[in-house]
Image (tube, helix red, strand yellow):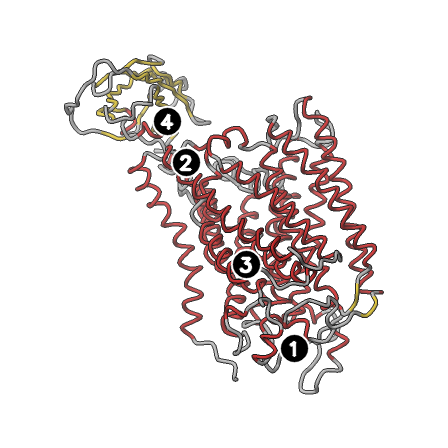
Amino acid sequence: MSSTTAAAAHDDHHHGPEKGLLRWVKTTNHKDIGTLYLWFSFAMLLVGGAFAMGIRSELLQPGLQLFEPQFYNQLTTMHGLIMVFGAIMPAFVGLANWLIPMMVGAPDMALPRMNNWSFWILPFAGTILLSTFFMEGGAPAFGWTFYAPLSTTFAPDSTDFFIFAIHLLGFSSIMGAINIIATVLNMKAPEMRLMDMPLFVWTWLITSFLLIGAMPVLAGAVTMMLTDRNFGTAFFDAAGGGDPVMFQHIFWFFGHPEVYIMILPAFGIISHIIPTFARKPLFGYSSMVYATASIAFLSYIVWAHHMFLTGMPVAGELYFMYATMLIAVPTGVKVFNWVATMWKGSMTFETPMLWALSFVFLFTIGGFSGLMLGIAPADIQYHDTYFVVAHFHYVLVTGALWGIIAAVFYWLPKWTGKMYNERLAKIHFWLAMISVNVTFFPQHFIGLAGMPRRIPDYALQFADFNLISSIGSFAFGLSFILFTYILVDCIRNGKPAEARPWRSAKGLEWTLAAPVAYHTFDEPPTRAEILAESQHS
Amino acid sequence: MERKKIKKSFWIKLVSVPVLMFFFAYAMVPIYDVLCDITGFNGKTGTVETEQEYLVDEERLVSVSFFAATSSGFPVQFSPKVSSMEVVPGKFYNTSYIAKNTTDEVIIGQAIPSVAPTDAALHFKKLECFCFVKQEFQPGEEVEMALRFVVEPEMEEWIKDVSLSYNFYKLDS
């Protein structure tokens, strides 16, 4: 983006970015790498979105219209994989790269060269994953959860490419997480204490611990798949003494922390935006930190609530059900704190605030449907229906993605030094807000009525709600064209933004000029500066 | 205040977490097996060495259903001799499965048992079973394979029906 221009004016012992395209290949600058991550994830969001459009086109009417069932399953699988590993996770790492060094007063990330490597693995992994579409037997079609034996005994040869892509994506995430932990713990301004850190930094620090704990388990699971498929082991093959259900245990031991990896940084973002536009300090700063840590801890011990139908002993079902219910407590603390921050605040509704408010509202709906799914006896009815699809799209689209979009609008003036078109951005918000609900809310009803997920055709009684859902999804898809226009328009033609475009915004990043210089915080901020920009009262 | 340098021990600790967690994924395999032995998690059944004496309550009856399945590429017809039995917990019973090799090749396979509900798996014990060893089927041969089992009286009262299913897998040698 345009952080280039300001660097020339910066003091002389520093160089600005290199000229030409090689700058982006060789860069070790956290701002450049953040930009790369964000554009990459945006491209992947559009690719995954195109798959979603394909899925909803097929489901517009009952019967098979456009695709063979096998290709339909490839679309749902790749939609999930691309959105989780290609769009949401890299977008949060991109935000972390851009923001964490500025928020803690560090000159850059702790391991700048590794940072470059973490990013540049991604385009290759993404290309390998997408190239499976053009291979014999097609892309993986076993769902993003790749349960054995679907992914071992019955999968196409392209699955080995999928495994390699997952290995690469895992490497990238683990290196990113190590970098973030090292940066936060060692590079923060010497005068900044842990409980002075802004919540985006706190939530990302905790997320990083989830990443280094969970991603290697995923790497282990796909490595076992690889040896089962090609080297004669039988981890998941009952004929050789293995157990396919064990695959699900290992997968969800990764998978449940993974869903918090995708939401905790969004919690941090919302905790920045709501105080700014409510013009009050964040309510309950320390309880936010403890709640985030509790959620992270609990996420490791509830995984089998995804597996209530695998035939667990009743005691196991009870344990996983109660442990799951327990997560509602710290999450409730967070939602309470956001609402309490707004209580008697002088609220205004600029675009980032609109996204943040709808995050609180819609994410909570997703949280409640999650509680319903966590009830073991009720899950027998809900399991693998569209109710699950509605649930995880409410937490991932109107949760994780909403948090990312809110962050983009909130910090875009800082990154680019330019203001986006507020009128268009509001139109975009309402278009997305209405269409996303038209898309996903009816899926609760068809799910409760029994429509299974991952099926290209359905019984006639589901036709009306599917039609509504598909129309909503097309409008939601269109909203991203408007989003792209708003971003490009801001970068190219935006009016110059002030260093602190939101009057009540607090945080060290707002003390920097806009557009922000290529190198910042060569000198760490002082204790007085840190306290003046602190999030809590 | 000066910025501090990052110590080597910090990097070692930090990098060892993902390395250990990778091996933890593999450690979950034996942990899972042990947990299954203790809890009956995956429906695997237990065995008894000798015909031990149980306290028998003649009034209590449990229905045991037998199922058979073969994995794809295993060309043996395989079915239980009787589809269900009423049993008294604590008493030993005999039944059998019948397998017929319809091809003109020698086929080797092994049956893997599974009991549902999983809460019953721990208390479903076998004294004798064809699933203990691999089976060899001569071309066109029909064999009756014996099973001697007991449902322990310790099994929870609420379980009235137990099902036992075998899946036959082909072995290469």
* Mark 4 crowd level (few <14, some 14–19, many ≥20, 10 Å Cα): many
Q: Quadrant of the N terminus of chain A?
A: bottom right
Whether pointer 1 and pointer 3 mark residues with C-beta atoms closer than 8 Å, the reply is no
Indicate the amino acid at tag 4. Answer: Pro
- The percent coordinates of residue B8 (x first, y second) are 42, 75
Q: Which residue is mark 4?
A: B117
The answer to whether A171 appears left or right of B100 in the picture is right
Tag 3 subunit: A
Using the numbered discs, state the Cα–Cα distance from disc 1 to disc 4 in whole angstroms.
62 Å
Distance in Å between CA atoms under marks 3 and 4: 40 Å
Residue pointed to by mark 1: A520
Within-10-Å neighbours for mark 2: few <14, some 14–19, many 20+: many
Q: CA distance from mark 3 to mark 2?
A: 32 Å
Q: Nearer the viewer, residue A159 or A415?
A: A415
- Which mark, residue A496? none
Bin the neighbour count of mark 3 within 10 Å (Cα to Cα): few under 14, some 14-19, many 20 and up: many
Give me the disc on residue A173: 3
Whether residue A125 appears in this view of the structure is no
Q: Dividing the picture into quarters, in which one does residue A496 lie?
A: bottom right
Q: Secondary structure at mark 4?
A: loop
Which badge, 2 or 1, comes first in the chain's sequence?
2
Q: Is residue B114 above or below residue A321?
A: above
Q: Position of residue A495 (x, y in %)?
A: 83, 67
Which quadrant is home to the C terminus of chain A?
Answer: bottom right
Q: A220 left or right of A363? A: left
Residue at position x 29%, y 31% in the image: B122
Q: What secondary structure is marked by label 1?
A: loop
Q: Earlier in the sequence, mark 3 or mark 2?
A: 3
| Circles 3 and 2: CB atoms closer than 8 Å | no
The mark closer to the camera, 3 or 2, is 2
Q: Amino acid at mark 2?
A: Glu
